[in-house]
Image (spheres, rainbow, N blue to C red):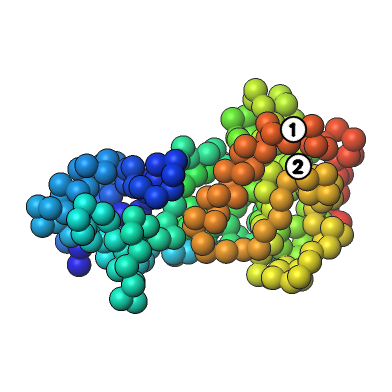
Amino acid sequence: MADYYISKVLYQQSQKIIDRVEIYPNNGEVLGESKEINRNTLVQYLNNGKTFATMTKKIDGKWKLMNNVSLIAGTFIKIQNNLETFDDLGNIPVLLTKRKTFVSYYHKDDEQYKKQFEMLTSDLIVKKSVGLGGIDSDNSDEYIKQLIQKEYLKDTTVLIVLIGPKTKCRKHVDWEISGALDLKVGDHYAGLLGILLPNHPDYNKEKFYYSNLPNRLAKNVESSFAKIINWTEDRLYLQNMIEDAFKGRKERSEKRINKSITQMINNTCG
């Protein structure tokens, strides 16, 4: 057991020197509050005999230990399978601003994946999604659209669509994507990212079919405004793709497609 666990790292621009890390103290059965320390403090802790290891989150929200971290001649090394990699803490997320992320999904079929995604990314994003039963379906469609846009999407900067086999059929998913791509949501459009779930017919295939995606998402993938990835538990990769979507809301804004697509009126499958 280590004295401290490292969950995130920030490298200097060269990507060869650690600048800062986020650490959690080991308080026995539980972890203490996280804090950021710079390289010099980390060196000082190690020189004073404190032990460190890296860790990452799993889909059940629990932390998983990864690699021990040591110091040789002022340089950090990751110990893994008896190999020493200098100043590389491995596949852990970067110290970045948490993006306000709305998760759109089909509540009936894919609630388990939404919960797993949120536990996997709980320290990487600011959650903005509508929970199961969060909106009364007996309300009028127009009221629900306004509620989604004004209450849930007003400051969202990234919208992630968890894509199961029936997600393409759901009108609420279409409304949520439409709302996120509406400039009225904030000063900028939200970025857009689709994640193919393991229950989707195109998951992990060599290619996916646009016809198996929600239409509004498919059009924005075709235009290169949005991207599609497979479901993954790689937190660093997820963070990179969320950050890419965040930057893409400005860098690829001219490729955004929204107003030209009529909003869905009905669900097209059960």
Residue reaching furthest to the left = 48
Q: Nearer the viewer, residue 106 or 100?
A: 100
Query: Could you say whether the residue bearing mark 1 is in a helix, strand or loop?
Result: helix
Judge whether residue 232 can be spotted in this image: yes
**Residue 201 to residue 73: above or below:** below
Percent of width and height locating residue 145: 74, 35
Residue reaching furthest to the bottom = 81
Q: Is residue 146 left or right of residue 12?
A: right
When asked about the image quadrant of residue 224, the answer is top right
Query: Could you say whether the residue bearing mark 2 is in a helix, strand or loop?
Result: loop
Q: Nearer the viewer, residue 72 or 181?
A: 72
Percent of width and height locating residue 144: 72, 37
- Whether pointer 1 and pointer 2 mark residues with C-beta atoms closer than 8 Å, the reply is yes
The amino acid type, in three-letter code, at marker 2 is: Phe
The N terminus - image quarter = bottom left
Q: Is residue 35 left or right of residue 51?
A: right
Identified at 14% across, 56% down, the residue is 50
The disc, 1 or 2, on the residue closer to the chain's N-terminal end is 2
Identified at 52% across, 64% down, the residue is 233
Residue for badge 2: 225
Instruction: Identify the disc placed on residue 145.
Output: none
**Residue 66 to residue 27: above or below:** below
The C terminus - image quarter = bottom right
- Cα distance between the residues tagged 1 and 2: 7 Å
Judge whether residue 138 can be spotted in this image: no
Percent of width and height locating residue 160: 64, 48
The amino acid type, in three-letter code, at marker 1 is: Ser
Q: Nearer the viewer, residue 136 or 14?
A: 14
Residue for badge 1: 253
Label 1, residues with CA under 10 Å away: few <14, some 14-19, many ≥20: some
